[in-house]
Structures are given as structure tokens and as C-alpha cells.
Amino acid sequence: MKLQTLTSQRFAPPPGALRIFILCLVLTLAGAGISACGKKGDPKPPGEKNTFSWVYADANISNECISLRGMLQGDYVNLESIRLELEPAGNIDDCIGCPFRPLETEVFYASDVALSETGEFTLLYCPEQKSHLYRWRLIAVNTYHTLPNILTPVLTVEDQAGPLPWN
């Protein structure tokens, strides 16, 4: 008979259980809402720390080789390498505004670049494809690969002696 009395009674939650359930639900929703707050997007490096930029870059041609000079400012001790991208061009008026398509690339590692205390350097490159005019740019690569590479604009250098005899 006792079994019949227990099953016939309606199950009632303990007192305060509904309050605890609502409190847990509110805290869960609030926690999810708070965790979604904040700045959106990719993380950015703090300030200018570990970064550098170009002050200038220029070039001249001598004896069929290109002498490059440049200067970096900032934390250039974090320089991993400087990459030269080079495109031989026939004539300065050939294709103004055409996309830059480098045909040669050379990497100068920081250990091989004589970087002065002021951030200046000089590099020498003798291109495989000879021309009297080149389009070029330099790319500075940071040792911290999460930081972006620093590019110079695409520049031109012309041999002041004029076109080579076989051009």
C-alpha cells in the first residue's frame, strides 16, 4: 500500500530549485554575452615596437651592375632580409602604369647587409638580364613574421651611359 501512495503523489521540486535554475540560466547567458564583447579583428602589434620603415631607397647603374642605397628607421635590428625585385624595361615610356612583373629576385640576408648605426646600407646586384633601364623595388622582411613586409614603391633606374650596344 505504501508503494501506491508514493507513485500517486505528484513530484514537486525542492523549494528554491526554480530560483537556482533561473539564476544559472541568467549567469550562463551573461557570461556568453560578456565574452563576445571587445575589439573585433586581427590582433595588432603594440605600437611601433619591433617595426621599421623606409626612409629612402635609390639606385644607379655602373658597369652593368646596380648599386642600391637605402635607409631604414625604427627597430631595424629586427631586419631578417632585404629582397630586391627587378624587371628589365626597354624604355621609360614603354608602359607607364603597367603592372610590375619582376623577372629577377635576389635576397640579401641581414647578416650580409652592412647596416650602419643610422640604418643606412649599400647593396650591389649584377642582373642576369642586361638592360639600360630597370623597374625595381625593395622589400624589407621582419624577423617577426606576423608583422607585414615593408615595400618601397616601384622605382626606375636608368644607365646614364644610354642603351647598351646590343639593345
Image: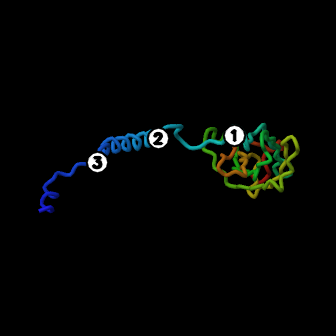
> Which numbered circle lies on residue 30?
none
> Which numbered circle lies on residue 153?
1
Provide residue 32's location: percent of width, then percent of height: 43, 43
Identity of the residue drawn at 69% across and 42% down: 154
Of marks 3 and 2, the one in the foreground = 3
Out of 142 and 18, give the one closest to the viewer. 18
Amino acid carrying label 3: it is: Pro
How far apart are labels 3 and 2 at the CA level?
35 Å
> If the image is split into quadrants, where does the N terminus sit?
bottom left
The quarter of the picture where residue 155 lies is top right
Provide residue 61's location: percent of width, then percent of height: 82, 47
Identity of the residue drawn at 15% across and 62% down: 3
How far apart are labels 3 and 1 at the CA level?
74 Å
Out of 125 and 94, give the one closest to the viewer. 125
Which mark is first along the chain, 1 or 3? 3
Left/right placement of residue 38 relative to residue 15 reads right
- Disc 3 marks which residue? 14
Of marks 3 and 1, the one in the foreground = 3
**Is 92 located above or below residue 164 in the figure?**
above
- Disc 2 marks which residue? 36
Find numbered disc 2 in the image and state the secondary structure of the residue it sits on.
loop
The answer to whether any part of residue 110 appears in the image is yes
Identity of the residue drawn at 80% across and 44% down: 159
Out of 23 and 78, give the one closest to the viewer. 23
Amino acid carrying label 1: it is: Pro
Provide residue 126's location: percent of width, then percent of height: 80, 55
Provide residue 125's location: percent of width, then percent of height: 80, 53
Find numbered disc 3 in the image and state the secondary structure of the residue it sits on.
loop
Amino acid carrying label 2: it is: Ala
The answer to whether any part of residue 64 appears in the image is no
Asked if labels 2 and 3 touch by Cβ distance under 8 angstroms, the answer is no
